[in-house]
Image (cartoon, grey):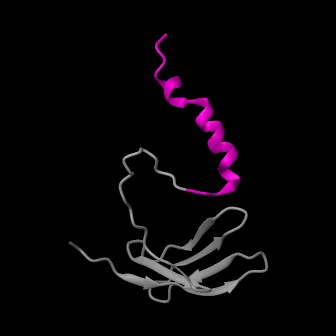
Amino acid sequence: MIEQQQHEMVLDKTHPSGTDEWYCPTCGRRLLMDYEPMYKKTVLEAGDEVAIHSGGKGGLRVGSIQAKPVDQSGSDMETDDRRLAPWTTWLDEVDFDSLWNKTD
């Protein structure tokens, strides 16, 4: 198995808007990270797109994503975010499974 290079991203600056600008001193990758109102990443310079980039600020570290199989219940979303409660309730009430399985 080929081992990917690992590069450490460095926080360059935080813009007045709250957007963080990160760069990789190894390959030149540059990106903007917005966190509010929704997470958004904008790549300014691609750098080494094959390398695994990680970094962190304020005690939080971000690295490579780990994939895992869906649990046996069929649910791939685990959240206790109260903002989603009305939507998850609505989705349960709509019963999409029966909509897709209708025979006319």
**Number of numbered discs overlaid on the protein picture:** 0
Q: Which stretch appears magenta?
A: 79-104
Q: Residue 83, located in which quarter of the rendered image?
A: bottom right
Is most of the magenta stretch helix, strand or loop? helix
User: Residue 48: horizontal and vertical position, in percent?
Assistant: 42, 76
**Of residues 34 and 100, the one drawn nearer to the viewer in this rendering:** 100
Most extreme residue toward the top, as rendered?
Answer: 104
Q: Residue at x 42, y 44 (%)?
A: 74
The image shows residue 95, relative to residue 81, as above or below, that is: above
Asked if the stretch drawn in magenta spans residue 83, the answer is: yes
Residue pictured at 78% horizontal, 75% vertical: 17
Vertical comparison of 21 with 73: above or below:
below
Would you identify the image quadrant in which residue 89 lies? top right
Q: Quadrant of the N terminus?
A: bottom left
Residue 65 x, y percent position in the rendering:
43, 68
Locate residue 24 relative to residue 36 in the image: left or right.
Answer: left
Q: Residue at x 46, y 22 (%)?
A: 101
Pick the residue in front: 46 or 79: 79
The residue closer to the viewer here, 98 or 62, is 98
**Looking at the image, which residue is at 41% across and 45% down?**
73
Residue 16 lies in magenta, yes or no? no
Q: Identify the residue at the far right of this view.
A: 16
Residue farthest toward the left in the current orientation of the protein: 1
| As drawn, 67 above or below 71 | below
